[in-house]
Amino acid sequence: MSRQLSEEHEELRRTVATFSREVVAPVIGDYYEREAFPYDIVAQMGAMGLFGLPFPESYGGMGGDYFALCLALEELARVDSSVAITLEAGVSLGAMPIFRFGSELQRQTWLPRLCSGEALGAFGLTEPHCGSDAGRIRTTARLAEETWVVNGTKSFITNSGTDITALVTVTAVTGTLPDGRPEISAILIPRDTPGLSVGQKYSKVGWSASDTNELILDECQVPEDNLVGERGRGYAQFLRILDEGRIAIAALSVGLAQGCVDESLAYAGQREAFGATIGGHQAIQFKLADMAARVHTARLAYYDAAQRMLAGEPFKKEAAIAKLVSSNAAMDNAREATQIFGGSGFMNESAVGRFYRDAKILEIGEGTSEIQRMLIARELGLPA
């Protein structure tokens, strides 16, 4: 495995790093405090082509790869995770299911707008009564005269309630399999479909400048052709999407963890205590050394998982390892950075205060740490 970035990847990384520092960093705190969605930042990200990074040019994409998306997510999250998760969800959860499993007509219809950033897509999997056990969903879709009629409620859906949200792909029970298990399919529902409504906007601990809502589907009707992929394969399809998404979330987590190092190093060189800058005290030096070690290890983990995926090799275990290690690193580094900053780190106006609020969800979203350990154990051959 090569740690060296290609010339194209390195240029992308530098470009997004500059954008994050010069465009996002000066204003994101205000969005965060107001819990406002940063439409202008998202528009600029779209103009840069970030939402189209891993998609072919024939669909309006940039012709890059999934690793390019991960590099962009890492650099964005070094400054702010709300912006990073908006990109991650828009690509991995909004557009990727259509690209991977949709019909050619669905790709041609939706991907150009999603790749441009002019529109956002969402994916509705989680429901009020089930999170990790997503096979127990209660949303249903019945086929009547070449029309899907969908009923149910979806929870914690990112990018589902913005002014530019164009669609949501939902999992729904469409029948019963021969062995008695529910048949789960994925169905694409345009945002303006009658019967689809946005419920409560959540008051979140972190990611306060991102969009997360409940979705309600009440006799929501869409054409039969809006089925995404094969009937009865919706859950299996989304498991594949989650495997890829875990690499992206790992990259985002590494960015947050690195941001904690960046902010703490700068602060340690300025803050004075007991006659010297605190960076001269061994206690602070050891904290920073451990923080840097966590980032290095986590970055190597997601690089490895991404390279395996792009090479067409099995990567489920490596993606779970990357997600587990990286989210732990983000949480640990956010805690240590807040400690280094002391009272200033407890203020929402500080970057590390936002990092601390944002870090915890990384151990929960797109598969909890417990789920990652379960997946790793199964890949090791241990009984399910």
Image: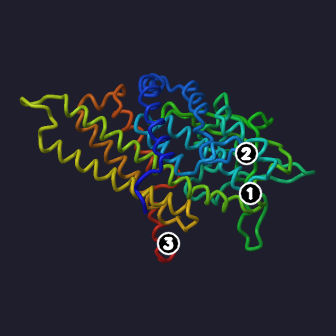
Q: Amino acid at mark 3?
A: Arg
Work out whether residue 247 can be spotted. Answer: yes
Q: Amino acid at mark 2?
A: Ser
Mark 3 is surrounded, within 10 Å at the Cα level, by few (under 14), some (14 to 19) or many (20 or more) other residues, namely few
Q: Is residue 131 above or below residue 82?
A: below
Element assignment for label 2: helix
Mark 2 or 3: in front is 2
Q: Amino acid at mark 1?
A: Ser
Q: Which residue extends farthest front?
A: 7
Nearest the viewer among 301 and 144 is 301
Coloring scheme used: rainbow
Position in image of residue 366 (x %, y %): 53, 52
Position in image of residue 356 (x %, y %): 36, 38
The tag earlier along the polypeptide, 2 or 3, is 2
Position in image of residue 6 (x %, y %): 47, 50
Q: Is residue 260 left or right of residue 172?
A: left
